[in-house]
Image: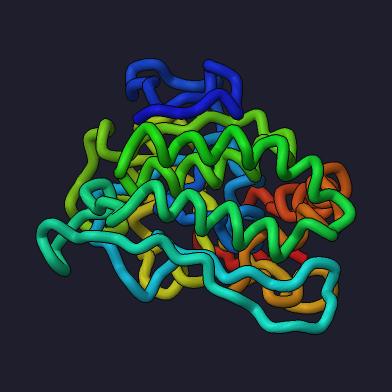
Amino acid sequence: MRTNGFLPTDSTASRSADAAPPAGPVCAIHQPNVFPRLSTLAKLFAADVWVVLDDVQFARRDYQHRALLAPAGGAPGPTRWLSIPTHLPAGRATLIRDARMVDPARSRRRSADLLREHYRTAPHWAAFKDRLDVFLDVFDRTDRLAVVAQESTLLLLSMLGWSGRIVAGADLVSSSDRTQRLADLCAAVGADAYLCGTGGMRYVQPTVFDRSGIELRPVRIPSDGWWAGAARTSAVAALTTHGPHFSAEILGRIRAAQPRESSTRDPVAH
């Protein structure tokens, strides 16, 4: 899987399972989302390794091809969807990595226009725009939605100064069982802890992680104050309003709040 240079060369997904990272990294496993929600970005920022899960079924109701843009600075105003029209070659059975943009050139223009319209007056628009201009070139190189979604996430992580690495989950050997696969992917990248969001905690089986010797760390993102709307709206609003340094400081508290406890415990990030 290709990356664009937002992150150091050592952070690309070209690494295989036999090139293990330093002992004890923390792993997040997530599908590529277009300009992901603040809650998703916080989880990835708290991880040392992001395993990109693009070999699972595409879901139109999810955030793989769209982002909900909130007004900058908490100002009153409507939210607006940035959506990329997507073709599914195999219908509902299409995997994320096989989804194709219907019209990449039009999606490029539409994405640029919507982001500019929504955030050009934000205090830190300039810092975002510099990276946005680089990101938009991805639309000229591919029609693969997963690549565009991944690159949009790397754009935001690069603004925050994330120094982790990404790995393509499809390149790693793992079980077909839902929970066991997560544990296998963590083991394949040498991680000793898995960051699990609220949605994942509804179905994962902690005993599977126990048997695998991997700590299961639930991540709960606050829903008030600075974090209002974090579970629904794109992180772009926060970064363009508060800037990369302040945003990184706030998101960094999610990682600092992660205790090293048994996976059968249920710690809460404050």
Residue 151 spot, x, y in % from top left: 50, 40
Q: Residue at x 85, y 68 (%)?
A: 73
In-image side of 8 versus 240 (left or right)? left
Q: Could you tell me how many numbered marks the image carries?
A: 0
In-image side of 244 versus 101 (left or right)? right
Identify whether 190 is placed above or below 57.
above
Q: Residue furthest left?
A: 90
Where, by quadrant of the figure, is residue 223 drawn? bottom right
Q: Residue at x 58, y 52 (%)?
A: 112
Identify whether 127 is placed above or below 197.
above
Q: Residue at x 69, y 76 (%)?
A: 229
Q: Residue at x 41, y 30 (%)?
A: 189
Residue 81 spot, x, y in % from top left: 53, 72
Q: Nearer the viewer, residue 102 or 158?
A: 102
Identify whether 166 is placed above or below 103.
above
Q: Nearer the viewer, residue 246 or 121?
A: 121
Quadrant where the image shows the C terminus: bottom right
Residue 188 spot, x, y in % from top left: 35, 32
Q: Is residue 180 shown to the viewer in this render?
A: no
Quadrant where the image shows the N terminus: top left
Q: Nearer the viewer, residue 153 or 267?
A: 153
In-image side of 62 versus 177 (left or right)? right
In-image side of 149 versus 262 (left or right)? left
Residue 182 spot, x, y in % from top left: 35, 50
Q: Nearer the viewer, residue 29 or 244?
A: 244
